[in-house]
Amino acid sequence: MRIGIDFGGTKIEGIALSPAGDVLASRRIPTPRDYAASLDAVAALVRDLEREAGGPGSVGVGIPGAVTPATGLVKNANSTWLIGRPFGRDLELALDRPVRLMNDANCFALSEAADGAAAGADSVFGVILGTGVGGGIVLGGRVHVGANSIGGEWGHDPLPWPAADELPGPPCYCGRRGCLETYLSGPGLARDHAAATGQTRTSRDIVRAAAGGDAAAVATMARYRDRLARGLAMVVNVLDPDVVVLGGGMSNVPGLAEAAQSALPAYVFSDTVVTRVVRHRHGDASGVRGAAWLWPAP
Ligand SMILES: [Zn+2]
């Protein structure tokens, strides 16, 4: 049995999966905003899942951050009380077994590669298009973590092939300008629409208005699709994955994956482009399912 834990900023989700990937037990608790209490909460959650599912399991944990390989310390976490802490090591002590800790975008990619929209593919790029933009890479069923634990983190690469009116690009919290995140996140879409029209609308409103034929919203969505295709083409030129899986709130825009796929050949350096771009299968459950799959079949 595999246990997956998705350690979010407001809630912790836990799941117990059978070897075939069926859900044996699942639970959700609020996230304590304190380090020691977080450790206790995860340990109690694992024990509850094991009691309900009727046996011991391997434990994988997804976090909204990364682990520095040399030290095992958490970095870049929006759950700031984890930063600089040996969360994985402390969980191993609390649970008396090995624990695998992984960035949540990597868990998303792994879940979709294991038994989701990219099942059966050898190389997968999983993309999160939400309030932020992130990504993860799975090769041969395993996450490519990378030397700096930032494999697949494309959100702070600049928008490629920029037009004159896209330079220097919007400022980003990371300190640079024109990052993909400033265009492809939900807030990025809203900012772009406001810059073009002077209207302040949420990304959800813009998507709805475009579906209803509102000309300005239709134009905003066309810019969004083209920028997504440009960003993905850059990844295809480096990694050339079999499948790109879109996740996060913006991935639910109808037809987005199909539109990105058909726009890819304009930018990819190849006469034929067979890359598949697909929407996620497991949605919000991908984080917790991917954490469980951190322990692959032996
Ligand atoms: Zn940035």
Image: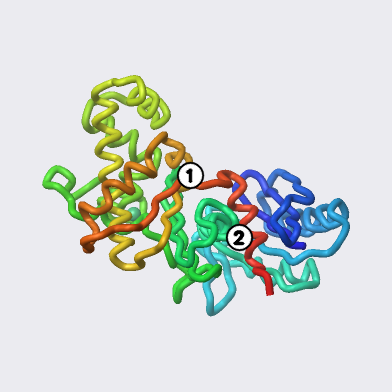
Q: Given the image, on which type of amino acid does mark 1 rest?
A: Gly
Q: Are marks 1 and 2 in contact (CB under 8 Å)?
A: no
Left or right side of 191 for 28: right
- Locate residue 133, reporting x and y percent: 41, 50
State the residue at coordinates (28%, 31%). Answer: 193
Does 143 appear above or below 254?
below
Does 65 appear above or below 214?
below
Q: 218 or 66: which is nearer to us?
A: 218
Examine the rendering and report whether any part of residue 63 can be seen. Answer: no
For the residue with label 2, is its CB less than 8 Å from the closest atom of ligand 1? no
Which quarter of the image is occupied by the N terminus? Answer: bottom right
Q: Secondary structure at mark 1?
A: loop
User: Which residue lies under the disc numbered 1?
Assistant: 248
User: Which residue lies under the disc numbered 2?
Assistant: 82
Q: Given the image, on which type of amino acid does mark 2 rest?
A: Leu
Q: 242 or 9: which is nearer to us?
A: 242
Which marked residue is nearer to the observer: mark 1 or mark 2?
1
Left or right side of 144 for 37: right
**Which is nearer the N-term, disc 1 or disc 2?**
2
Q: Within 10 angstroms of label 2, few (less than 14), some, or many (20 or more) residues?
A: many
